[in-house]
Amino acid sequence: MRSITLGRYLPGSSFLHRLNPRFKLLLLLIALAVIFVLKTYAGFSLLFLLLALAAAAVRLPLRLLAGMLRPIAYIVLITAIIYFFFTKGGVVLLRLGPLTVEQAGLSAGFLVIMRLLGLVFMSMLLTLTTTPLDLAQGVAYFLRPLGRLGLPAAELAMIMTIAMRFIPVVSEESQRLLRAQMARGADFGGGFFSRARKFAPLVVPLFIGAFRRADELALAMEARGYRIGARRTRLREEPVTAADWGALLLALAALAAVIYFRL
Amino acid sequence: MFIRTEDLTYTYFPGTPFAVEVLRGVNLSIARGSFTVLLGPSGSGKSTLLQHFNGLLQPSGGRVYVDGEPLGYSRRELLQLRQKVGLVFQEPESQFFAETLFDEVAFAPRNFGLSPAAVDKRVQRALQLVGLDDAAFLAKSPFRLSAGQQRLAAIASVLAMQPQALILDEPTAGLDQAAQDRLFALLQELNREQGITVIVVTHRLEQVVPLAHHFLVMVEGRIIMEGSAAEIFSRPDVLERCGLALPPATRLMQELAAAGLPFSTAIFSLEEARAEINAWRERRAQR
Ligand SMILES: Nc1ncnc2c1ncn2[C@@H]1O[C@H](COP(=O)(O)OP(=O)(O)O)[C@@H](O)[C@H]1O
Ligand SMILES: [Mg+2]
């Protein structure tokens, strides 16, 4: 309950904090491409060295990092085990009854661990250094061209921004409700099924609160002249700097290098 | 002493960059059967403190004692504690989920595994205490009650645990004057007739002074002052730090006394002020 959830912003003024959110999204995209092209241990070592440097620059505390990785540890482990046992080829390394771990399985498993960890680590660096609002605005920017195809891009962006804005509110509210019902003797411990049965006292008030807030927000937006389809400008424009372009070029160069040198 | 804390500290999200030290060494004692008011500016840690009394939050440092025993935090101990110390959250009607008032108030006793007959009795008793015992209410949706009735129903849902202490966090927030009066009358009855230890966070000084035995003033995670109404009101500067003003009657008497008239300043309501002034006029007329 006290864990810090994925997707939290860590206030700061590091190099990553100061990059333009749109460029950070592009960087993440390129980095994802890098991760899926990478296939040597040397390549991954290099990648994690860079990520460690970035984490140090952001002043990411180790405890926080561990806390954020814990929830996905199971997923990574289970996926890796599936690869260990079901990718066949090469020397048989381990035999467990009818199951065998072969050399190809071992390297496929390691690869998948590296990829998943790298993926989570990089997404984490993005959300830690970008406020949810900036993130939503960044995504919205890339949706804009789709407006010409008839997609309600501005409205989608607004929905995303509002959703981001309310994630902490709803998460705080659910914590409060949890404790309020515990004060009335509710016991949310126990296994998954016994917990699911006790859902109503949490979910019902949470939904009622969400609907009430949505109503109030709609009213407040209308009162301030929000109309679907109206053109809007932002109060705070994120400037694009030379550093943004530099970072983008570096990332592209890295991707090219990984492909060229078959790292 | 019914509730006692020793050097209680609490930090949200300890060991992360989001850490906030909210309680910074709280020492307090609350007597059994007393009526205690907790004052303090918003953000001073009042709500955080209250949640330690029924084990919802576990201290980062220091100890909490209830009924002379240091609190234990096993599941069984917590369940027992929550029955003993009832906590009414701020805007408690936002926890409603049941289809009928009966089911809402029955939630707590059912959680403690009482028999249906015992649950029925508890619900009737709790609703009777708050004055919602009209049979027509039982099958009504709790969401269809008026704001004041909802607040009372939420309090009943905690009273149904038959706690020895009742803790309320800003129970009058958002209520109109009549509903506030009704609520303070209820708190008085619970404390004086039922012998329930009451601890309340409120800013309605005038209304709570006649009920209260003891005041605690919290600023920035510490209890900076405690005492009776007279002791607290002799320090208007401290109240001001809490964003509180003296009751008008007290301020009037303090100003008159400062102007040289022989008035007591331990006066908190207009009725008391009127009696004091009339007594003085009679004494003067006789001379
Ligand atoms: N669940 C929480 N998580 C993190 N910080 C909190 C939480 N609840 C309260 N705080 C912080 O603790 C401080 C005290 O809050 P609170 O106990 O609610 O004070 P009060 O009830 O006196 O207004 C505030 O600064 C608030 O931001
Ligand atoms: Mg509070």
Image: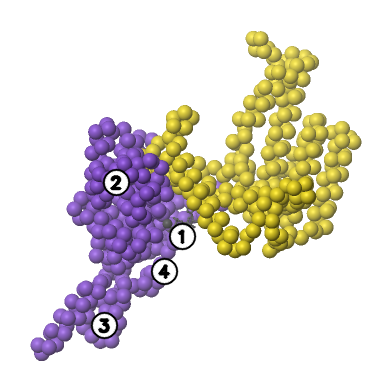
Chain colours: A yellow, B purple
Query: Which of B224 and A68 lies nearest the eye of the viewer?
Result: A68
Question: Reading the chain from its start, which is encountered first: label 4 or label 3?
Answer: 4
- Say what amino acid the circle numbered 4 marks: Gly
Given contact means CB atoms under 8 Å apart, are the residues at marks 2 and 3 in contact?
no
Q: Which mark is residue B43?
A: 1
Mark 1 chain: B
The residue carrying pointer 1 sits among few (fewer than 14), some (14 to 19) or many (20 or more) residues within 10 Å by Cα, namely few
First reached walking from the N terminus: tag 4 or tag 1: 1
* Residue lying farthest to the right in this orientation: A260
Rendered residue at 21%/83% (across/down): B262
Q: How many numbered discs, if any? A: 4
Q: Which residue in the structure is indicated by mark 4?
A: B243
- Between disc 4 and disc 3, the foreground one is 4
Cβ of mark 2 under 8 A from ligand 2: no
Q: Position of residue B60 (x, y in %)?
A: 45, 48
Decide which of tag 2 and tag 3 comes sooner along the chain.
2
Nearest to the observer: residue B134 or residue B191:
B134
The answer as to whether the residues below labels 4 and 3 share one chain is: yes
Kind of residue indicated by mark 1: Gly
User: On the image, numbered disc 2 is attached to which residue?
Assistant: B137
> Which of the marked residues, 4 or 2, is nearer the chain's N terminus?
2
Residue found 42% across the figure and 49% down from its top: B94
Chain at tag 4: B
Instruction: Give the residue displayed 70% in from the left and 53% down from the top.
Output: A154
From the viewer's perspective, tell me whether residue B188 is left or right of residue A105.
Answer: left
How packed mark 2 is, by other alpha carbons closer than 10 Å (few <14, some 14-19, many 20 or more), is some
Quadrant in the picture for the C terminus of chain A: top right
Give the side of residue B46 with respect to residue B68, left or right.
Answer: right
Q: Quadrant of residue A239?
A: bottom right
Distance in Å between CA atoms under marks 4 and 1: 12 Å
Q: Position of residue A256 (x, y in %)?
A: 87, 40
